[in-house]
Amino acid sequence: MVDRGVPHSATQARTLLTSITADGPVERVQKRLVSEQVDELEVIDGKIKASDKELRGLIADRGSTLMDLNGIGPSSAARLLADIGNIHRFATRDRFASWNGTAPLDASSGDQQRHRLSRSGNRKINRVLHIMAVVQLRRRTTGRAYYDRKRLAGKTSKEALRALKRRLSNAVFTCMLADQDRHELAGPGGQSGTTTHSSATGFNPNTDPSDKPHPGPTKQPNSARTSSS
């Protein structure tokens, strides 16, 4: 059988398979086995689509706009909502970044000022932010532009990625804060209004998040409103 590239979905795999001619008994067995695998992929794809649809509905019922952020899909939004809960438990976005492991750790030596990635914090949420960063780096986004500016400023690729993840942590914090504040203003049974967070990328161009690390979350539920920069 001829190698015609790697398909990216079960539908593409099925289309590719039908275009291949099995000339001999070995090729026919290979094609049958591949067809069975594609059958399984189609079932899995269907389950994923059904799960995504269900998650989208649940997220919409929560009044969340997390999926407006570039790089956040249904599963990532659900993970953020489930693990974070009440965003007001974080007094500031810096405490949120410390909790999710995107706050940098000081690795300076002498006159050389350096920071490194933190290996602590909620690794599931850190993974969500990492995927979000990778998605933005693959496209012409403000996140990609921010990363490129860091590289031009002399940062290594890892340092630039760390800074981007810290910035995306700010975007998630701002988005969730606006969503929850809007929900609280609407009251029980109320209709949510227009979101107050900035854009689909959630960046504030007047702040630079390559800051010192901060301690974890506090238990003051309403103190997050004091975190605006």
Image: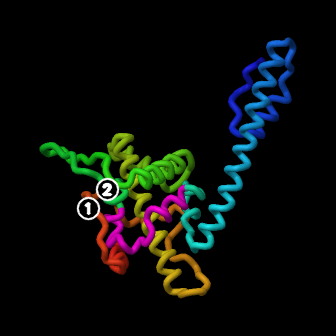
State left or right for residue 143 relative to residue 19.
Answer: left
Q: Can residue 216 be seen by looking at this rendering? A: yes
Name the image colouring: rainbow
Element type where label 1 sits in the image = loop
Q: Kindly identify the residue that appears in the image at 54 percent across and 61 percent down.
A: 78
Determine crowd level at label 2: few under 14, some 14-19, many 20+ residues with C-alpha closer than 10 A. many
Q: Which quadrant does the C terminus fall into?
A: bottom left
Question: In the image, residue 86 lies at what x, y percent?
Answer: 43, 72
Determine crowd level at label 1: few under 14, some 14-19, many 20+ residues with C-alpha closer than 10 A. some
Element type where label 2 sits in the image = loop
Name the amino acid type tagged 2.
Answer: Ala
Q: Give the residue pinned by disc 1.
A: 214
Q: Kindly identify the residue that appears in the image at 40 percent across and 47 percent down.
A: 161
Question: In the image, residue 113 lies at what x, y percent?
Answer: 21, 48
State left or right for residue 29 relative to residue 108.
Answer: right
Q: Is residue 60 magenta?
A: no
Q: Give the residue pinned by disc 2.
A: 103
Question: In the image, residue 152 lies at what x, y percent?
Answer: 38, 45
* Distance from Cα at disc 1 to Cα at disc 2: 7 Å
Q: Which quadrant does the N terminus fall into?
A: top right
Choose the circle earlier in sequence order: 1 or 2: 2
Q: Is residue 88 magenta?
A: yes
Splitting the image into 4 quarters, where does residue 223 fall? bottom left
Q: In the displayed structure, would residue 166 be above or below residue 1?
A: below
Number of on-image labels: 2
Q: Kindly identify the residue that appears in the image at 43 percent across and 67 percent down.
A: 173
Range shown magenta? 76-96
Splitting the image into 4 quarters, where does residue 228 fall? bottom left
Q: Main secondary structure of the magenta part?
A: helix
